[in-house]
Amino acid sequence: MSFLEVKGLGVGYRRPDGRLGPAVIDAAFSLAEGESLGLVGESGSGKSTLARALLGYCRPGGVITSGEILLEGEDIRKLDGAGIRRLRGGRVAFVPQNPLSSLTPHLRVGSQVAEAVRIHRRCGAEEARQATLELFAAVNLPDPAALYDRFPHELSGGQRQRVVISAALAGEPRLVVLDEPTTALDKTTEIQVLELVRSLRDRFKATLVYVSHDLNVVAEMCDRVLVMLQGRVVEQGATTRVYRAPAHDYTRRLIAAVPRIDRAAQAVAPAAGGEPILAVADLAYRYATRRRWPWSRGADDGRPALAGVSFAVAAGETLGLVGESGSGKSTAAAVIAGLIAPDGGNLRFAGKPLPTLASARDPATRRRIQIIFQDPLSSLNPRHRIEAILARPLALFHGLAGAAARKRAGELLGQLQLDPAFLDCYPRQLSGGQQQRVAIARAFAADPDLIICDEITSALDVSVQAQVLELLKSLQRRSGAACLFISHDLGVIAQVAARVVVLRDGTVRETGATAEVFRRPADPYTRTLVDAATRGYASLPDLPGTSAAANGTEP
Amino acid sequence: MRIDPFALRKPAALLGLALVAIHLVLALFSPWIAPFDPTELVGGRVDPPGGEFLLGTDALGRDYLSRLLHGGRMALFVTFTGVVAAVTAGSLAGIAAAWFGGTLDDVLMRLCDVKLALPGILFVSLFITGFGESFGVLVTLIGLVYFPGVIRIVRAQALTQVNLGYVKAAQLRGESAFSIIAREILPNTLDVVYVEFAIRMSHAVLLLSTMSYLGLGLSPPTPDWGLMVSEGVGQLAFAPWLVLFPAVFISTLVIGLNFGAEALAGALGLDASRGHVGGT
Amino acid sequence: MNRREMIAAVGAALAGLAAPEALAQPKPKRGGKFVYTNLYPNNRMGDAKNGRHPYHLLDINTRSAFNGLAFVNDRLQVEPELATAWTPSADLKAWDIQLREGVVFHNGRDMTADDVIASFAFHQARTSFARQIAKVEKTGTHKVRMHLAKPNSEFPFILGEYQLMIMPAAPLETIGLDGIGTGPFRIVDLDPKRRLVMERNERYWRKGLPHVDRLEVASSPGRMESALNGFRGGQFDAVLGVDPGILPELDRIPGTVVSTALSGDQALMILPKHEGSVFADKRIRQALALAIDREKIVRIVYGTKTGWVGNDSHLTPSNPEFLPVTFKRDVAKAKRLLAEAGHPNGITLPTFYFTASWPEVPRVFQVLAQSVKEAGITLPIEQRPSDGYRDWRVEDKARTRKHRFAYGPAGVRNPGVSLYRMRPDNNESGYWSGAACEKYMKLYDEAVVEPDPVKRKFLYVQMQQILADEVPAIHPAGRRNMLIHKSNVHGLENHSQFWSIRFDEVWKA
């Protein structure tokens, strides 16, 4: 008898019209004790829903419609309320994606975990405190006694996730379900948390179900993998087997779409010689703390967001700007775009000094520099139709109006492989990838010479990401625009940028040709980043076999 | 506006919308429905309900039903005008405060603090003592009472947008402040503005009744529910219907508006009970 | 007998009448507690200006703790109180006053001329009624002479004003602070604006009085419903100043006795006559006066028993000099007058402002505004908050003699005071002027120096006729003060001047 066996599981969500929309259809798998299972798939594939169902739980509006969930032979769907309560946090524990929302803001983290300990172990306050401190030590929290009395907001993201994991371990669970536990964390922090989960798995002999969109992470963590597509399980098996020899076409595409730094760069090549289109030197910026009173001075706490950053983008080239959150890469984008004025340094654009704020720049310059933002939805006004969104820059920069503007807007959509019928849609009616393509179209509507891409694919699924990047490259190639491409993902950078600048804490750590920098990082920090990015590559298939499929649009 | 029709099908929502609709119809058509002129002295002193005068007469012998019907007309007209003024001005000021920030924001917010720190009834009585009880004054007063709350709510809503991509993009295109406010920010605050309007309406009806009850609102002989309660309260022991009928009219309208506001908020995906209900 | 002696004699005769035993009713029972609540606004029951002074805190309740030199009864006749007789000089400018002997203050001290002099020094500084007194001279241990700035044939009425009570002599800064008087009760506890508790003064100069041991006053200005609840629940033995609107319903409270005074406050419509005001035209004033259905106002608002029709003067049916209305409502004539004044199709008057000094004031003007419609007069009315109403309506900061078309309350006083309120420089007259006004003032000047009450009455009647014809102001209707008490309460008489109700003779069966 297997430890966990799921048969014919169906989960549906109640739609506004009262009918059930299926989210998980006929899922079946089994897991032996101590095994770890990765649930992969793109957003909306039902992987989180399936994971939650293992605890007999659904998000509001959801219902488990069919099937059996046998945990050590016992169907948890047949448990009563008390049985379910004993199950959750006892034999089965759950670690959610956002650690902040699973901690109560006004309670000390120690007492929150201790409460879980008291409930599951039925022990006294002092014993619970001791157990909590042990758990904190087990999840490698520094100085457990001091952390015990802190509030959630006083902890870093990684520490919070460790606290949540320690709470999940309070009931000494046999099965731990982790739903994208590291997605909100930086790459280097993610590695530490993954190390922790792995060591805990070995130490507590728990069975793991690990939900992730990141195939690298799953490759690293899980013995088995289960691939989901539109609520159905399309493939499952041993991780190495599935990764190396995917049976289903979708799995194959998914794996191929993973951006990898060891893949040959197909970046837009820099234009030969010539003056750089953009040159920044000694950029400095510090976020002002809000002044309490008009006459008081802002406190000079915190380190600067940018401290003497210099680089140049050649005409037509794509320069990658890579770094973790807080490295100052988005600040650099905002400064160059003209959203904020730097505290120091100078900017030159096409050989001429560039006024700092967009409002001080002349319309032609404003046209020539365009930016695409990270979140596709919030970068499109939800109240405007796509046509209006695209028509605005056309009218402002090119004087196009009416039918001419609509025609041009339709062409732009066509170039991004979007149906011109979308012109009459609102942004919400589009998927994330389509929204981001509209945002790209809006930027190119201005006919720019420099495009700033600020993490434009980090909110997208891998397969969509690959498509968006390809479209961006093709448009760029066609228009000859240079691109400053900002990302935390080295694989993505490797795919688009010929040259890369590595930022950390507002300073440039390393600059050079992307392939060179990633292959032989000179700076220790770059090396850490590269190590983190390549950890799961061992289980991924070798490159040449699948890269062609991933780059179907490439010549 | 994306409306979720299912939020409007809840019993409370239906009840609310029905009550508001009934009151609207009664108010709009009161001159034709009402059996008598609301100020004419047609009956005896405090005739009980039934007979020629369906809901009796008041202390001066005026038909109570006609006064109640015309009272709704007045209450809705005054509060509607005042609240529209408050919501319109408050929305523009709130967005401007969010967009321009700095001194304008500080000054507006401090003014709101001052107004919100002042007890509502005290503010009302000072204002009425200073300016009287005419229609224009009452509309202005209701406008002023709800203006700061609307500013705060709309400002908060607008602030969430100031850093969104489409606003930044407009800024980087070199759009004027007016264009950004009108084209980009305002359309996205409209949901909140509608709900604000509905909630403030119910507050305003109650406030106007309270004011009239305290002698700070509409002046006799204008038929007004609060005034009718206050005139009737002296005879509560002998003629309880003089208080009961206007009280029923006030509460059904307020309940209707409240449920309606909640339903609207639900339909628009907002939470009326949390962020959007402001005090007076 | 010369005129001076005659006035003195009147005083002496009334003094003989004052003994309580005169009315042989069931024998009063001594003891017990009498609690009443007062719906009248007690303006001074503690405000910022004089909140510390018990004398002022009492305001309209002064007569229970103090006495004046004289007392004005409900028929507006002056009776002796702490004075036993008064004699004017020939020019009516100096008044010799004989004080009652053997009167003792609550603290056991005898009341003498010194106390009267010290009290009036305080009143001269603090109260408008005493301003006409230039000097008070001591002419004996129980005798004073008061010198007036101008002759006043009705000066004894002034001595009965509720603000001019006699307190034990003390420096101006401290007089009255101890709350000690000569009145039937002494103050035990005083919670300003709420409650006043008093106990019997065992040494009261009216022998055998008061009957009750304890007197408690709860102040509930305008709170008719709570007062009635208290009355129904037995908390109060009496309610003073009952809203006439509830009269028809009072029979439903068993064991309730209603007592009405001869008159009470009336509503005054001030007609501003500055340049540009429609009321500068006499015909419009007359038309308005003729169009008002006064009988209907009384019938609807007061229900005949508690109201009376006003004659456009400040006098009331309590005044023996009161001239009942001589003209009838005449809509046709009102229309004719309007047409003559250039308004053949009717007229819309400026907004008339009023405040609810009494609960029925809004009703009076609502009925009034309805009744003038028949004559083609549209009278918009608007209620104002009572706070600051007086200053607001006068609106004469710059001495422009402008005034709002507005209501003013008019209390009950002797004609010498009441008719003087229509003088040209007083806002209540709407700054009246012209030949008729001059004639009116000439008659008034004659009256103040006329010692003979009969001749004075003749002058006063002429003055009222001028007002009725000229209509400088409109007094449509007035109230008869109403109080209710339990049927076991005896000896409680109502009074047109609600501040003059006495509790000396009250007892409970």
Image (spheres, rainbow, N blue to C red):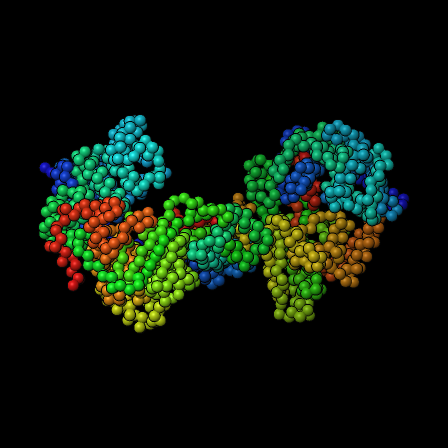
Residue that lies at the very extreme toward the bottom in this rendered image: A403
Q: Residue C363 at x, y = what percent?
A: 60, 53
Q: Is residue A512 visible?
A: yes
The quarter in which the N terminus of chain C is drawn is top right
Residue found 70% across the figure and 57% down from its top? C398
Q: Which of A431 and B107 lies nearest the eye of the viewer? A: B107
In this rendering, position of residue C492 left or right of residue C255: right
Q: Quadrant of residue B40?
A: bottom right
In this rendering, position of residue A456 left or right of residue C461: left
Residue found 68% across the figure and 35% down from its top? C506
Name above or below for residue C293 compared with residue C227.
below
Q: Is residue A45 visible?
A: no
Q: Which of A504 and B239 lies nearest the eye of the viewer? A: A504
Residue found 20% across the figure and 49% down from its top? A520
In this rendering, position of residue A370 left or right of residue A475: right
Q: Which of A501 and B212 lies nearest the eye of the viewer? A: A501
Q: Residue A106 at x, y = what percent?
A: 37, 38
Q: Quadrant of residue C210?
A: top right
Residue that lies at the very extreme toward the right in this rendered image: C1
Q: Which of A300 and A383 lies nearest the eye of the viewer? A: A300
Q: Residue A425 at x, y = what percent?
A: 28, 63
Q: Residue A393 at x, y = what percent?
A: 34, 66
How many numbered circles are shown?
Answer: 0
Name above or below for residue A229 compared with residue C1.
below
Q: Quadrant of residue C69?
A: top right
Name above or below for residue B255 compared with residue A112.
below
The quarter in which the C terminus of chain C is drawn is top right
Residue found 26% across the figure and 35% down from its top? A140
